Image (cartoon, helix red, strand yellow):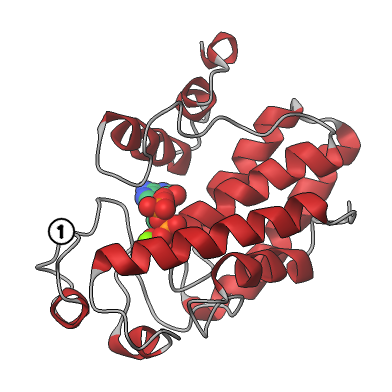
Amino acid sequence: MARTPLVAFFNRPKMIDYPEGATPLDPDEMDGLKHKHVTTRGELDHLEQANIQNGLQWMKKSRKKDIVNERFVRDLHKKLFGDVWKWAGIFRTTEKSIGVDPREIAVNLRMLLDDVHYWIQNETYEPEEIAIRFHHRLVWIHLFPNGNGRHARIMADALLMKVFGKERIDWTGGYDLQAMGDRRKEYLTALRNADQGNYAPLLAFIGLTDKAQ
Ligand SMILES: Nc1ncnc2c1ncn2[C@@H]1O[C@H](COP(=O)(O)OP(=O)(O)OP(=O)(O)O)[C@@H](O)[C@H]1O
Ligand SMILES: [Mg+2]
């Protein structure tokens, strides 16, 4: 897989092995790749991973606690993916198999941010549950052409750390969540349950089993 040429990889989106639950890029989005020398999926993964590490440092260092707003949501995506992709931090304009109609992204995000503010003010749920509900609604809207899972996991962590002063979520549980293993299967099943309004499996997934009865 690390040796799959990118041209074949992106021109035949139905035939390449994206991990389940990932969103293929269309050719225009592929044009947004800043490193034209990249030829394999392995090289791309590597570049993205390095970019994400820098973005994480930015998130942790930033003193800003006011993160439940469109500016921060987009800035974080740009910091995580902007060295690699030109469209980082810009809302998706194409349809994907997951996510709302691209024309409805901004309004759906506004509703979500309003809900999160309300949950925080009214202590509607425990902080961890607010974080995973935030996470799920972000991936459900699917704001960006790619990187939604990774961005929304870090966004949930930022909420826990900066708004609630709590530890970040252990999403991987020691496994590689991006590879198609049991941990990713469990994660995707939990998200599909959340799509139906049942958040118990997602709470169990992050280790809050007592609330998952
Ligand atoms: N049925 C679903 N309901 C809600 N969210 C989903 C569903 N299926 C997948 N997702 C989310 O979409 C993400 C994949 O989208 P995308 O490829 O944009 O993100 P990514 O960061 O590139 O992927 P990854 O999560 O593998 O790092 C998954 O990680 C998951 O968070
Ligand atoms: Mg992806």
Helix, strand or loop for disc 1? loop
205 or 62, which is in the foreground?
62
Residue for point 90% across, 39% down: 121
Q: Amino acid at mark 1?
A: Met
Decide if residue 125 is on the left or right side of residue 25: right
Which image quadrant is residue 151 in?
bottom right
Q: Name the residue located 52 percent from the left edge and 16 percent from the top edge.
A: 212
| Residue 99 in view here | no
Q: Nearer the viewer, residue 62 or 14?
A: 62
Question: Looking at the rendering, in which quadrant would you find the N terminus?
Answer: bottom left
Q: Is residue 105 left or right of residue 71?
A: left
Q: x, y (%) of residue 91?
A: 56, 78
> Residue 74: horizontal and vertical position, in percent?
67, 70
Residue 116 percent coordinates (x, y): 76, 47
* Other-residue count near label 1 (Cα within 10 Å), few / some / many at <14 / 14–19 / ≥20: few
Query: Would residue 88 appear left or right of 36 to someone viewing this image?
Result: right
Note whether 28 is above or below 51 in the view shown.
Answer: below
The x and y percentages for residue 29 are 39, 84
Q: Which residue is mark 1?
A: 1
